[in-house]
Image (cartoon, rainbow, N blue to C red):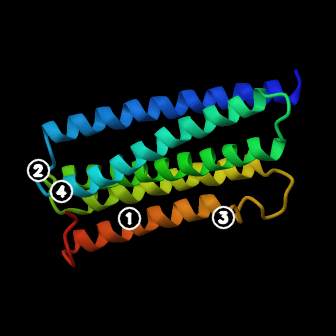
Amino acid sequence: MNNEEKKQINVRDWITLSAVMIGAVLTILALIWQVPPTMGGIGSVTFLLMLSFILFVNSVSANSKANYEANLKDTIEERVNRFLTFAEFTFGLGFTFVIAGFTILGYKYLLGSSIGRSIVTLMLPITFLVTAWIMIFIYNIINFSGKALKAVRSMKRNLWMFLELICLVIIVFDFFEVFSIP
């Protein structure tokens, strides 16, 4: 199998994954609007999930364009790689927004439940995000094996983790009633 065939297979997988994420995001949006959290957060979560929807749609489009370009006879590989990189960044950012949305959503549902403002409620977002960060770190180690410190220096994944950390700080502020998440 030559490099062009490998790219097509990988692109098709990313198109499928992005399409699944589009369906998941729309389903989640429909469900949370049926029974929104009583303690707020529906606005923030809707905003994050709508942004992720746009980013996943773009990921499908950019991967499709990369696939189309790869099948042309006179295409420069750099052009295909630009579309693939754009698709990768938009998918990653969309996934980050989904993670942040789920974190806020789970926290707000627990906050409005019989559990209320307890340490268990605060542990959910912390545990959820730390687990996601461990998975990202393991993925980076596998992805960059043999490249010293490259796993730690992955700029895009560090940026995504930083955005999720900001989400966690906002949740902590909400928990201690410094301000409320809309």
> For numbered disc 3, what is the local secondary structure?
helix
Q: Nearer the viewer, residue 76 or 170?
A: 76
Whole-number angstrom distance, CA of label 2 to CA of label 1: 24 Å
What residue would you read off at disc 1?
167
How far apart marks 3 and 1 lie (CA) works out to 18 Å
Q: Position of residue 112 (x, y in %)?
A: 13, 53
Describe the element under mark 1 as helix, strand or loop. Answer: helix
At 55% across and 36% down in the image, what residue appears?
61
**Cβ atoms at labels 1 and 4 below 8 Å apart:** no
Residue at x 54%, y 56% (from the top left corner): 133
Residue 125: numbered disc = none
Residue 148 relative to residue 15: left or right: right
The amino acid type of the residue labelled 2 equals Ser
Q: Which mark is residue 155?
A: 3
Residue at 81% x, 50% y: name it. Answer: 145
Which residue is identified by label 4? 111
Which amino acid, mark 4? Leu
Between disc 1 and disc 4, the foreground one is 1
Q: Earlier in the sequence, mark 3 or mark 1?
A: 3
Callout 1 crowding tier (Cα within 10 Å): few <14, some 14–19, many ≥20 = many
Taking the view exactly as shown, the residue that stands out farthest to the front is 74
In this view of the protein, which residue sits in the foreground, 129 or 82? 82
**Residue tagged 2:** 114
